Amino acid sequence: MERSVEERIYQMEVWHKDFPELLNVTVIQRIQLKDGKSGHVVLFSDDLNLPYDKIILYYRLRFQIEFTFRDAKQYWGLEDFMNIKAAQVKNAANISMFMVNFSRFLTEQNRADTEPSIFDIKIRSQTAFCLDLILKNNPEISKVISFEKLQMTLADIGCIHPQKKAA
């Protein structure tokens, strides 16, 4: 297969007028071979001994960490807890981070069947929890319709990616 993008990586030590020490700068340039359009990314480090591949890796990891915190805040309550004691804060933060990792695991597990989002996983989990409570208090409902069918039907109302129904 023919490559459509050429990537060039440059590394140099440079001075900056607002920074008192030398900087380790890595520039990544990507060129579209079809039309010659190009773009570049400039990465900085104050560690002069760091090779360019490590700088690129650290920036990728940095953004992955930021996405993890965004998901923990947006979906799993990291922003909403009101604890002030150290143990409670630690527990709440750890639960939020665990749920981010667990939801990513579930997303990967379900990738073949559907394209679930974290929001879909959260809706399906909340639906299962609520249905379980309802069926414990009203067991006669389970005689009319199965838990799984009821859960899928109700969860799909709020999901971004409804599950595909078997024909």
Image (cartoon, rainbow, N blue to C red):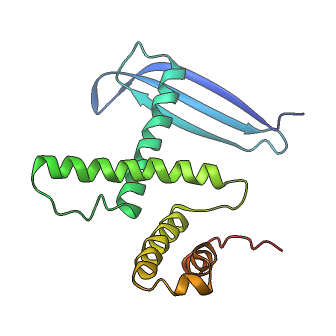
| Residue lying at the far top of the rendered structure | 49
Estimate the x, y position of residue 9 in percent, counting from the top left. 61, 25
* Residue placed most toward the observer, 75 or 15: 75
**64 relative to 75, above or below:** above
| Residue lying at the far right of the rendered structure | 1
Q: Residue at x 65, y 55 (%)?
A: 110
Which quarter of the picture shows residue 134?
bottom left
**79 relative to 3, above or below:** below
Estimate the x, y position of residue 35 in percent, counting from the top left. 82, 45
Q: Residue at x 30, y 58 (%)?
A: 78
Q: Residue at x 51, y 87 (%)?
A: 140
**Can residue 67 be seen by looking at this rendering?**
no
Quarter of the figure with the C terminus: bottom right
* Residue placed most toward the observer, 36 or 150: 150
Estimate the x, y position of residue 85 in percent, counting from the top left. 9, 52
**Can residue 16 be seen by looking at this rendering?**
yes
Estimate the x, y position of residue 69 in percent, counting from the top left. 37, 50
The number of numbered badges drawn on the structure is 0
